[in-house]
């Protein structure tokens, strides 16, 4: 546990250093000048589209939960639960998976069985990662083929491509064939020899069986969810194109695609919100493409949107936390 905390702390410090370096390199005056030129109307349009996209994320989770359990939780409540999960993932160095336990906890508090809540969150996150990996992979492939990626980075690009597509393939193949994605990894690395892992073995198998049942018996729903996932990830392109356009730069489709995909490798690294890595990666891609734009301001505007979501998510999580404590206290008094 201590080693993990040290590693995560080092990544967080690295992110802060990289972020500060990009800020100093860009210059405070330059950042402020570009932010002042970005009108409130443009920011309002951007926020509206972001909320619409977040609604699609929630719709995917809502369909998954309704399919596997028939739980009658309102769309708006799920929307807030998901935003709370986003907030926790964004603020913790967890490679964008830190919010899932909170989503599961909030669902469980709504009366959804723990295994069902876990299955819904895992299936939802797997679709999100698969779509993101697919877009990043296509972006890397395009950058390799058209020469946008420097020659010294092409080997790294090919390795990342293989790892991402292999992970997507094995997750769905192992799940649909009832091999068990998580248990197969535990067996391969012989983690199942450890006592702590053995104590969780039955729960992991139960989770995998529920996931396998979903993929086998709800294939039509699954393909609908894949379509939603591709649409939500495509919003990355729209967001980057619009923000750049509002900053006075008209990107081509290829430029938009590359800048909307490759830098998001930063979210795979356990740094809160890809801090520093996303800014540096975006700037590097713009330089490689020869696009004259303040990359830090573009990313910063997107981060302001993210922080609005984080704020709303934390408010909801706090309210739910107080409610759970109040219920627990009342139950204790009754007993």
Image (spheres, rainbow, N blue to C red):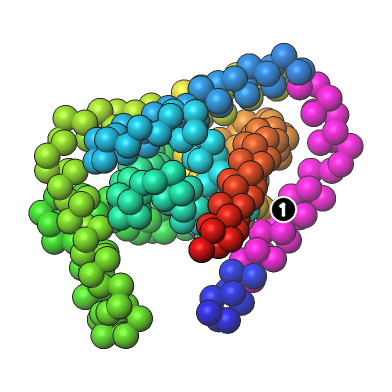
* Residue depicted at x 25% and y 28%: 224
On the rendered structure, is 21 left or right of 284? right
| Quadrant of the rendered image containing residue 189 | bottom left
Q: Position of residue 223 (x, y in %)?
A: 22, 31
Q: Is residue 219 left or right of residue 186?
A: left
Question: Residue 133: percent from the left, percent from the top?
Answer: 37, 45
Q: Which residues are magenta?
A: 10-38
Magenta span has 57?
no
The residue located at (80%, 28%) in the rendering is 34
- Relative placement, left or right, of 9 versus 258 is right
Looking at the picture, how far across and down is residue 279, in whole percent?
65, 46
Q: Is residue 94 above or below residue 131?
A: below
User: Which one is in front, 333 or 32?
Assistant: 333
In-front residue for pair 176/238: 176
Q: Badge 1 local density, few (<14 within 10 Å), some, or many (20+)?
A: many
Residue extending farthest to the top is 41
Near-viewer residue (138 or 329): 329
Q: Is residue 267 visible?
A: no
**Label 1, on which residue?**
19
Q: Does dot 1 land on a helix, a strand or a loop?
A: helix
- Answer above or below: position of 237 versus 118: above
* Most common secondary structure along the magenta stretch: helix
């Amino acid at each position: 546990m201590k080693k993990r905390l040290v590693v995560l702390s080092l990544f967080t410090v690295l992110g802060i250093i990289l972020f500060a370096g990009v800020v100093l390199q860009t210059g405070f005056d330059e950042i402020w000048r570009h932010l002042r030129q970005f009108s409130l109307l443009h920011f309002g349009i951007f926020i509206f589209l972001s909320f619409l996209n977040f609604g699609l994320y929630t719709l995917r989770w809502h369909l998954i939960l309704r399919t596997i359990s028939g739980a009658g939780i309102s769309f708006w409540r799920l929307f807030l639960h998901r935003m709370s999960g986003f907030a926790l993932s964004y603020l913790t160095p967890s490679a964008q998976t830190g919010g899932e336990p909170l989503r599961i906890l909030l669902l469980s508090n709504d009366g959804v069985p723990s295994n069902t809540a876990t299955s819904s969150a895992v299936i939802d996150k797997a679709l999100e990662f698969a779509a993101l990996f697919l877009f990043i992979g296509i972006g890397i492939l395009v950058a390799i083929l058209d020469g946008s990626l420097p020659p010294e980075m092409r080997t790294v690009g090919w390795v990342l491509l293989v790892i991402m597509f292999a992970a997507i393939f094995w997750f769905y193949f192992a799940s649909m064939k009832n091999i068990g994605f998580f248990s197969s990894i535990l067996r391969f690395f012989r983690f199942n020899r450890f006592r702590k892992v053995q104590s969780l073995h039955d729960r992991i198998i139960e989770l995998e069986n529920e996931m396998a049942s979903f993929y086998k018996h709800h294939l039509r729903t699954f393909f609908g969810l894949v379509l939603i996932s591709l649409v939500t990830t495509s919003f990355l392109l729209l967001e980057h194109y619009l923000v750049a356009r509002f900053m006075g730069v008209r990107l081509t489709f290829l430029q938009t695609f590359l800048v909307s995909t490759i830098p998001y490798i930063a979210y795979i690294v356990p740094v809160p919100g890809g801090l520093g890595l996303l800014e540096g990666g975006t700037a590097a891609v713009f330089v490689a493409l020869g696009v004259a734009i303040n990359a830090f301001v573009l990313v910063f505007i997107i981060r302001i949107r993210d922080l609005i979501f984080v704020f709303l998510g934390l408010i909801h999580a706090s309210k739910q936390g107080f409610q759970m404590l109040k219920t627990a206290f009342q139950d204790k008094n009754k007993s």
